[in-house]
């Protein structure tokens, strides 16, 4: 997808993505699946950076709710951030957000991740 990792430590993961034509839907806006994928990557990263085996195969998204608040277009740079809010021994509650290069809020999400033992 072309994601760049900016922060990956202490239960926080930040990534960025420069929007290209391949990321657009038929209406020339960023596809909702791209937004959701960015949130899932950042939020999963927030969890994986806290476990001994930092492999993405060690965590599973149980559920994630996404709110789309504003659109984005080609040429924008989207910055996604995931942060652990509450961690149990196997289930982790995480919140995430996406802002554009101007700091405008594009989407918010929350969800639960399962840590495989």
Image (cartoon, grey):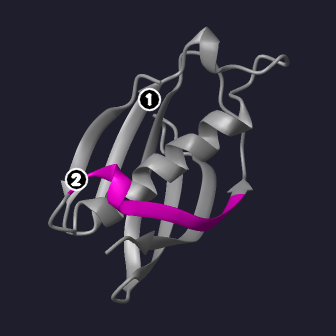
Image spot of residue 66 (x, y percent): 68, 58
Residue under label 2, please give it: 8
Residue at the left extreme, as displayed:
52
Residue plotted at (51% across, 51% down): 40
Secondary structure beneath dot 1 equals strand
Magenta segment's dominant SS is strand
Work out whether 25 lies above or below 21. Answer: below
**Magenta-highlighted residues:** 54-66
Residue under label 1, please give it: 17
Residue at the right extreme, as displayed:
27
Q: Is residue 49 magenta?
A: no
Image spot of residue 106 (x, y percent): 62, 46
Secondary structure beneath dot 2 equals strand
Camera-side residue: 24 or 88?
Answer: 88
Residue at the top extreme, as displayed:
21
**Residue 24 relative to residue 41: left or right:** right
Residue 58 occupies which quadrant of the picture? Answer: bottom left
Query: Which mark is in front, 1 or 2?
Result: 2
**Residue 31 relative to residue 104: left or right:** right
Residue plotted at (41% across, 57% down): 44
**Residue 52 relative to residue 13: left or right:** left
Image spot of residue 110 (x, y percent): 58, 69
Residue 117 occupies which quadrant of the picture? Answer: bottom left
């Amino acid at each position: 997808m072309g994601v760049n990792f900016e922060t990956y430590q202490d239960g926080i993961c930040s990534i960025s993505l420069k929007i290209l034509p391949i990321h657009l839907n038929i209406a020339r806006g960023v596809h909702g699946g791209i937004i959701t994928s960015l949130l899932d990557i950042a939020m999963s990263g927030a969890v994986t950076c806290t476990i001994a085996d930092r492999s993405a195969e060690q965590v599973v998204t149980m559920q994630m709710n996404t709110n789309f608040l504003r659109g984005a277009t080609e040429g924008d740079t989207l910055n996604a951030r995931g942060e652990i809010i509450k961690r149990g021994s196997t289930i982790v509650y995480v919140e995430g957000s996406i802002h554009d290069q101007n700091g405008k809020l594009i989407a918010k999400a929350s969800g639960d991740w399962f840590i495989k033992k």
